[in-house]
Amino acid sequence: MSQPIELLLTVTRGAPETLGAQIETQLRTTIRDGTLRAGARLPSTRDLARQLGVSRRTVVDAYAQLSAEGYVTLRQGARPHVAGNATAVDPLEHEPRARYDFRPSVPDVSTFPRTLWLRSVKAALGVMSDADLAYGDASGIDTLRTALAEYLGRVRGVAAEPARVMVTSGYTQGLGIVCRALAASGASRIALEDPGDPEAAAIISRAGLQAVPIGVDAHGIDVARLAAADADGVVITPAHHHPTGVVLTPERREALHAWLRDRDAIAIEDDYDAEYRYDGAALPALQGRDPERIVYAGTASKVLAPALRIGWLVLPRRLVEVAAHEKLLADRGTARIEQLAFAHFLTTGGLDRHLRRMRKVYRARRDALVAALAEELPGARVRGIAAGLHATVELPDMDEAAVRASARERRVDFELLGDYRLGDNALPPALLLGYANLSEPAIRAGIRVLATGLVHDGDPGSGQSASAP
């Protein structure tokens, strides 16, 4: 690098904020208010540590967090600088961002394959006819439905004929379409996992159906309770339960298939992050065993980015027509240019390559989270990490409300298992910590800050090694 450069920045020992937090806050503010403009050079970590009289690790972690938030660009062998897309905003008009955003199920959108996607969009526009730019089949463009049928059969064992594939504007819309189709077909009660997604319960209710919470334990959804619930269908996440991370056991799978046959019921299989499995072989989708009683639902939100509003359903034959009518009324079809671009991205191997890359990235971040928890919170029990984008972390004698309040003071964001309680299922106090959207240094720094708050306000437990059964 060239000669050291100076930066007007100070830190105060003994202040409420840590030294690293003070560095982050001052840099974030000067970037937001335009004092430091896009492209402005910053001192190296070594130079800034020397100027401020702090450890280099403190500056490395601060820069890593600002990089994760999109304020700073870091490249090996190059001087750090303010990111080109960092824009000046009025800090009075915005709540301060979390320093460490551990919210679950949030992918790293900075890794979106922009160049490949632009190539796919260009290819799609190059082959689109004038007719393709008009209204078409609300269930989706044939090219994408065919590509999805091939892909899902290959990687998830889904029995998918293109005519039974529906392209949706994300999973939320897909679930709403299925629920309204079930209501139109005479259903009245739909079960869902407890703990589970509160939005799913709201979607079920909005369709005029009664949502019935069914407890989940270490083996998955309690099928015996499901059988006694007089439900017409069930929403499940069998490959990696959201939020606990447990996998539906073979015995429960068999019991669920038996219940579907005996009840002639419908299951909606939310396969939201099955592509991200790190330990052991991937489990095939339930739908492949009983395609006439199971709706398979997936989305591009976790594998690429939520901004790409593309999801998919694979429907039993009895629901194809009524679901197509509901989709037509919803929006007359998902954006067609994006559909053709996604079809090109699938068929040219773009998604396969992206997933191979991100599995390595996310696995390294998961390992960093587990290691940081073992070091900083040795009493933690870490669950649900064989797959997905988050871990469930149980802490003995934890007061969830106190932990949340302490973390907010330190601007650490996460969710609690209690946030997902839908019924009377007894749940242990636990944190839900996403690791996909943070760099490894930021994960270590964030867990350190979280642990400091827990110790300061009352350590929920220590003396045991962190475990990940």
Image (cartoon, helix red, strand yellow):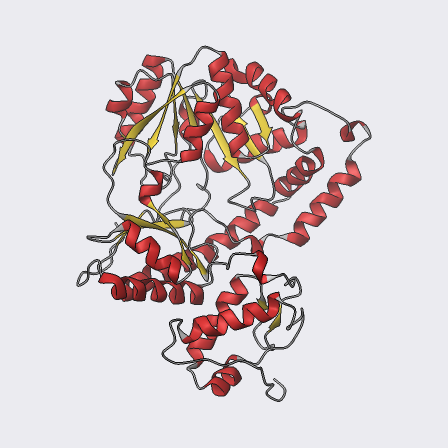
| Residue farthest along the top direction in this orientation | 186
- Count of numbered marks: 0
Residue 195 placed where, x, y %? 32, 36
At x 24%, y 58%, the residue is 466
- The residue at the far front in this view is 92
- Residue at left 23%, top 37%? 426
Please tell me which residue lies in front, 143 or 439.
439
Let me know if residue 63 appears in the view.
no
* Residue 335 in view, yes or no: yes
- The percent coordinates of residue 429 (x first, y second) are 25, 47
For image coordinates 61% across by 40% down, the residue present is 346
- The quarter of the picture where residue 164 lies is top right
Residue at coordinates 51% horizontally, 26% vertically from top-left? 176
Give the quadrant of residue 251.
top left
Residue 247: give x, y in percent of width and height: 32, 38
Q: Residue 402 placed where, x, y %? A: 29, 54
Q: Quadrant of residue 411?
A: bottom left
Q: Residue furthest right?
A: 130
Looking at the image, residue 462 lies above or below residue 163: below
Relative placement, left or right, of 124 versus 285 is right
Q: Quadrant of the N terminus?
A: bottom right
- Pick the front one: 370 or 345: 370
Q: Nearer the viewer, residue 24 or 237?
A: 24
